[in-house]
Image: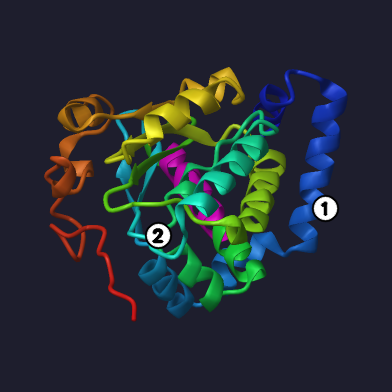
């Protein structure tokens, strides 16, 4: 833990100690140590209907893999979309250690904002962070190797427009939590089936994002997805839709089910 905070705070001991104290206080105030025990299973199942995801296998370096899919979002017009993107990039530029890729991939986010309160969505994000941190600790014990990062696969298939300004307060809270309380947890992030405009936006964004963070993000072309993923992940740890051979999921070969909402 201390080493992660030192790296995140550029080896400034004073800033590191303050960050650790702040995190301890934040965890106590928000009862974070109980979140995995106290969150009902029905809440977890419901969240997957709005943002299909799976905590699915491990990389060759033993990092837990988190997979999330996107969906079509027709609730935002083009002008709102472009304005929101500009604001998002300004927010990203203030983030030195974390790029919230999972947020960009949230499916049906407008429906999420209608169904759940902001506090519930933030709590859901903390739950996922804690769950995957626990997976990393368990993997460390099993393989006898220190594991602290989480690898993300974002599937943007079907995404047409980014969500509007309603999502920005949630984005700001997620950025603040990840930067302050989960530093240096991000491993590689593989972005699949991105919209045509995304590579241009990512190239713009990279100049504002911490270079170490930017180097972990891979925007993959369709013809290179399988080969690059398989360089980092064994095929039996990948769903079949990503050219893997997973048979261990209860819903295999549909390892990350997508649900239709009314």
Side of 208 relative to 239 (left or right):
right
Q: Is mark 2 on a helix, strand or loop?
A: loop
Tell us which disc is closer to us: 1 or 2: 2
SS at mark 1 in the image: helix
Res 145 seen here:
no
How far across and how far down the image is residue 25, in percent?
A: 82, 52
Which label sits on residue 25? 1
Identify the image quadrant of the C terminus. Answer: bottom left
The secondary structure that most of the magenta stretch takes on is helix
Q: Is residue 134 magenta?
A: yes
Give the percent coordinates (x, y) of residue 153: 35, 42
Residue position marked by numbered label 2 in the rendering: 107
Residue displayed at 38% across by 29% down: 199
Residue at screen point 28% across, 53% down: 158
Mark 2 closeness class: few <14, some 14–19, many ≥20 residues within 10 Å: many
Tell me the quarter of the picture where residue 188 sits.
Answer: top left
- Magenta highlight on residue 42: no
Q: Is residue 1 above or below residue 117?
A: above
Q: Going from the N terminus, do you reach mark 1 or mark 2 first?
A: 1
Magenta span: 127-141
The picture places residue 175, in percent across and down from the top left corner, at: 65, 45
Q: How far apart are marks 1 and 2 (CA)?
A: 32 Å
Measured as percent of width and height from the top left, residue 157 is found at: 27, 49
């Amino acid at each position: 833990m201390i080493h992660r905070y030192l790296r995140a705070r550029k080896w400034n001991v004073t800033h590191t100690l303050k960050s650790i104290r702040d995190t301890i206080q934040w965890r106590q105030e928000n009862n974070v140590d109980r979140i995995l025990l106290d969150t009902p299973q029905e809440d977890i199942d419901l969240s997957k209907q709005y943002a299909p995801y799976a905590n699915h296998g491990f990389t060759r370096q033993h990092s837990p893999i988190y997979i999330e899919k996107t969906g079509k979002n027709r609730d935002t017009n083009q002008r709102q979309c472009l304005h929101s993107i500009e604001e998002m990039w300004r927010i990203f530029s203030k983030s030195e250690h974390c790029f919230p890729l999972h947020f960009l991939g949230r499916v049906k986010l407008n429906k999420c904002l209608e169904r759940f309160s902001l506090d519930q969505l933030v709590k859901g994000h903390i739950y996922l962070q804690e769950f995957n941190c626990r997976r990393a600790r368990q993997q460390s014990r099993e393989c006898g190797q220190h594991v602290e990062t989480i690898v993300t696969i974002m599937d943007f298939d079907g995404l047409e427009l980014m969500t509007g300004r309603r999502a920005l307060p949630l984005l700001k809270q997620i950025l603040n939590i990840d930067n302050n309380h989960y530093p240096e947890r991000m491993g590689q992030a593989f972005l699949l089936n991105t919209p045509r405009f995304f590579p241009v936006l990512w190239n713009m964004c990279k100049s504002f994002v911490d270079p170490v963070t930017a180097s972990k993000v891979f925007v993959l072309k369709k013809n290179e997805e399988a080969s690059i993923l398989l360089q980092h992940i064994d095929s039996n740890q990948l769903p079949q839709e990503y050219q893997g051979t997973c048979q261990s999921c209860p819903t295999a070969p549909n390892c990350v089910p997508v649900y239709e909402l009314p």
